[in-house]
Amino acid sequence: MAAIGVHFGYTCACAAIFKDGRADVVANDAGDRVTPAVVGYRDTEQIVGIAAKQGRVRNAANTVVKVKQVLGRSFDDPETQTHKTETKCQVVNRQGKPYYEITAGDHPQYIAPEDVAKLIFHKMKETAQSALGSDVTEAVITVPFEFAQAQKRALREAAEAAGFHVLRLIHEPAAALLAYNIGQDCPSGKSHVLVYKLGGTSLSVTVLQVNGGMFRVLNTHTDHSIGGESFTQALAQHLAAEFKRTFKHDVSANARAMMKLMNGADMAKHSLSSLESANCFVDSLHDGIDFDCNISRARFELLCSVLLNKSIQPIRPLLEMAGLSTSDINQVVLCGGSARIPRLQQMIREMFLDVELLSSAPPDEVIAVGAALEAGLLVGKEGLAPEEESVTVDVSATDILVKEVNESGADVFTVLLPSGTPLPARRHHVLSGGGELSSFCLEIYQRSLTEQPEKLAKIVLRNLQPRDKNHNIDTVVTMKRDGSVHVSCVEQNMSKVAKVSGLTAVILQRVFTFASGHMRAISFTVYHHRGFTFLANLQTPKGLHISRRGLTVVAGLLPEVFSS
């Protein structure tokens, strides 16, 4: 049975199919094995891929790029605001969520990021089906390690809307290791692997420990200030300076001309990964003047020397934080289109002397190949438990925090489980409140990298009895290997209890249990196949009993749990 692995990146998407025991990347209708993650809207037509990217010069206001940047985010999220300033397509606020305002046609349309992503996934599905000659629905989708649950949920829902049955979401570093069969041939023995990914808009470096066929993330670093587009921009600025020197016209402030130069610079950059020189030709760049320029690889490397140094700068600090040095690394895996740059590969080789540098698979395809191999494993084992016999990255990807209010009324966040904590993990924390309180509120948050904390749950202990001393609330937070978070709150003297379980999107079930007095339990359970998402349509599966007394579920399935 055929299955597909899809790597949905910020700038490009790639699909690989698993059939007859092997995974192969499939080419799109233009013959390219990587498809630009770009969608253009024109009248009633939606254009996806290279045609949309090339047409952006004339249709920038109705062309969506880098949609992954806003998937699962609110309109006020800093990443959304950054995206809004960088894209020519208008991003508007509709009920707190970002939408693209498309002016193609008679009336404006408002398109959700998930609908844009759905078109890209549908393009990947069509590409795979064209190569296979038959329908394919079973898929494994890759996600960045730092993705929050709302982002994972949005990505999965977009894939399902495109017709995929999503078998699993796996982290990109895990997919990269799978592609090279790391840890699979030798189930015993410990090694350390560094996964280096330089994609279109971000740099990520992850160091993993491979032991007994299991992968454990020791440390990870992501930087969205540098990526392949940074190199393209540097080359485009050089080309603009060359045009000004030759023709005495400054096009640096001309958005349309610079977009043409960006397209030309991007093609030249790709050529320089395999050639010593490349030609950049732009038809009618300005005032009907054609621009023709040759660029050498040496010149390109000189122009991008600062960027190249910045690209490898995080590696040593990352290793030091994990208690390792470059000599402790056994293998380095290269991922992302810009990891093809020869000078960058040379710099990494010089840093890791006598270490195997894995780049035989094209770096922009390797993650999709790993996802396809995982898909093949899953379709071949229908009875496979969701977190067994597969890649496990058993470390927390986000900080888990509790919010308290201090004496001055200010919010104070306490990190109970920092990101990178080996799983499973358990933390105990005592909260205190005045004896006059009749209720006690506890809020659990997660925080990814430098983002603002995102609320996971709110737990309220009610009907507390007044007392002379403070109320002491024993709080226990547990994170299991599957990433699910379980919280228990107990008022020490009154036996008032509230619990909430399964706060993440990577579990089979969400169970909220809370009790008081004689431990009378009220439970709410939602079960859905293979986990990795919330119940999207809020429908009740067959055989499911739901007791709603004392329970409120608000928008987005954020649980608010109350004791009786």
Image (cartoon, rainbow, N blue to C red):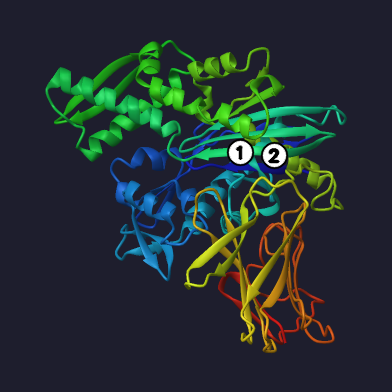
Q: What residue appears at the point 70 percent right and 47 percent down from the top-left corner?
A: 421
Q: Amino acid at mark 1?
A: Thr
The circle drawn on residue 220 is 1
Dividing the picture into quadrants, the one containing residue 376 is top right
Q: Position of residue 61 (x, y in %)?
A: 30, 51
Looking at the image, residue 123 sits to the left or right of residue 134; the answer is left
Q: Which residue is mark 2?
A: 217
Answer yes or no: do the residues labelled 2 and 1 have beta carbons within 8 Å? yes
Q: Amino acid at mark 2?
A: Val
Q: Position of residue 457 (x, y in %)?
A: 63, 69
Extreme-left residue of the structure: 248
Q: Position of residue 359 (x, y in %)?
A: 62, 21
* The N terminus, quarter of image: top right
As rendered, which of 450 and 426 lies closer to the eye?
A: 426
Residue 402 seen in this snapshot: yes
Q: Is residue 97 above or below residue 449?
A: below
Q: Is residue 410 above or below residue 211?
A: below
Dividing the picture into quadrants, the one containing residue 142 is top right
As rendered, which of 138 and 324 lies closer to the eye?
A: 324
Residue 365 seen in this snapshot: no
Q: Position of residue 35 (x, y in %)?
A: 51, 37
Mark 2 residue element? strand
Q: What residue appears at the point 40 percent right and 16 percent down from the top-left corner?
A: 301
